[in-house]
Image (cartoon, helix red, strand yellow):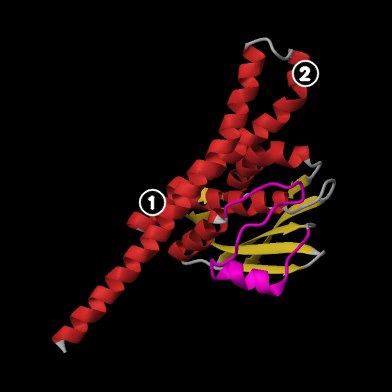
């Protein structure tokens, strides 16, 4: 019995090592490509400008794209750091009372340049209610869901952020008019198995954002529901504890 227990422990340890190696490979792949590429492009363009090889007028059309590239790189870096932390140390929420509306407004403001580049309007219908959760984690959850909504929504469409109150929970819904996805893809997302696909403007992704969302929702003891239909858009609902 002792020998079987030791063998079982060794097997579990080997599985954990294999899992960590896969994570390490994923992180290195992201650093070497998804982080490096936009930084290299930004550096090269600024270098041309500084050397006088292109004029400020010629540079102007690229400035908005550079701004969005830098923003996407910042979001990816933060996701990468937080994902690594959760894998190494787990997630320990710091729950407190705060007003939810300013948090969502701040996220919208952060992502506004990405939405403007696609003429997407974002409307926040969430009222200024008091909630009891981790403010930083909620901010990251909403930011990742909203940036995905922008990514998969075509030019000129709308994204609505709505609220519903159910007993002691606030349900925040992010509803887009995007390309939607199949039930198979929704199931893969829920099980952290989905591969990242390109957005309606060929935007790239890594898939880390939604994994982080699912981990944080679980750590907070909350729920997330994803409903979608191909060609009809996607609705993502998250629950947040209301402050009594």
Farthest bottom residue in view? 1
Q: Is residue 205 magenta?
A: yes
Tell me the residue that label 1 is attached to.
85
Farthest left residue in view? 2
Q: Position of residue 204 (x, y in %)?
A: 65, 48
The N terminus appears in which quarter of the rendering?
bottom left
Nearest to the observer: residue 221 or residue 207? 207
Q: Is residue 87 visible?
A: yes
Please tell me in which quadrant of the rendered image residue 69 appears. top right
Q: Position of residue 188 (x, y in %)?
A: 60, 70
Q: Position of residue 151 (x, y in %)?
A: 71, 50
Please tell me in which quadrant of the rendered image residue 57 appears. top right
Residue drawn where x is 65% and y is 23% of the image: 45
Image position of 207 (left or right of 184): left
Q: How many marks?
A: 2
Nearest to the observer: residue 198 or residue 88? 198
Nearer to us of marks 2 and 1 is 2
> What is the crowding at mark 1: few (fewer than 14 residues within 10 Å), some, or many (at least 20)?
few
The span shown in magenta is 179-206
Q: Position of residue 200 (x, y in %)?
A: 77, 51
The kind of secondary structure element at disc 1 is: helix
The kind of secondary structure element at disc 2 is: helix
Residue drawn where x is 60% and y is 35% of the image: 38
Nearest to the observer: residue 187 or residue 24? 24
Ranked by sequence position, the earlier of labels 2 and 1 is: 2
User: Please, is residue 192 above or below residue 31 in the view?
Assistant: below
Q: Residue 58's mark? A: 2
């Amino acid at each position: 019995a002792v020998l079987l227990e030791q063998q079982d422990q060794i097997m579990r340890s080997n599985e954990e090592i294999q899992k960590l190696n896969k994570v390490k490979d994923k992180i290195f792949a992201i650093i070497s490509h998804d982080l490096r590429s936009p930084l290299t492009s930004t550096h090269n363009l600024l270098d041309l400008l500084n050397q006088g090889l292109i004029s400020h007028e010629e540079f102007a059309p690229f400035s908005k794209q550079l701004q969005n590239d830098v923003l996407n790189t910042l979001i990816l870096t933060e996701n990468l750091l937080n994902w690594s932390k959760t894998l190494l140390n787990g997630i320990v929420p710091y729950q407190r009372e705060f007003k939810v509306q300013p948090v969502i407004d701040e996220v919208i403001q952060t992502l506004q340049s990405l939405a403007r580049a696609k003429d997407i309007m974002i409307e926040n219908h969430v009222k200024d209610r008091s909630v009891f959760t981790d403010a930083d984690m909620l901010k990251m959850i909403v930011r990742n869901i909203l940036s995905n909504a922008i990514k998969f929504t075509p030019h000129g469409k709308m994204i609505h952020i709505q609220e519903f109150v159910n007993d002691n929970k606030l349900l925040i819904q992010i509803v887009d008019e995007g390309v939607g996805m199949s039930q198979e893809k929704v199931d893969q997302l829920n099980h952290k198995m989905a591969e990242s696909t390109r957005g309606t403007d060929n935007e790239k992704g890594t898939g880390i954002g939604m994994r982080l969302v699912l981990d944080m929702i679980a750590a907070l003891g909350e729920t997330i529901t994803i409903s979608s239909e191909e060609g009809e858009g996607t609705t993502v609902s998250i629950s947040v504890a209301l402050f009594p």
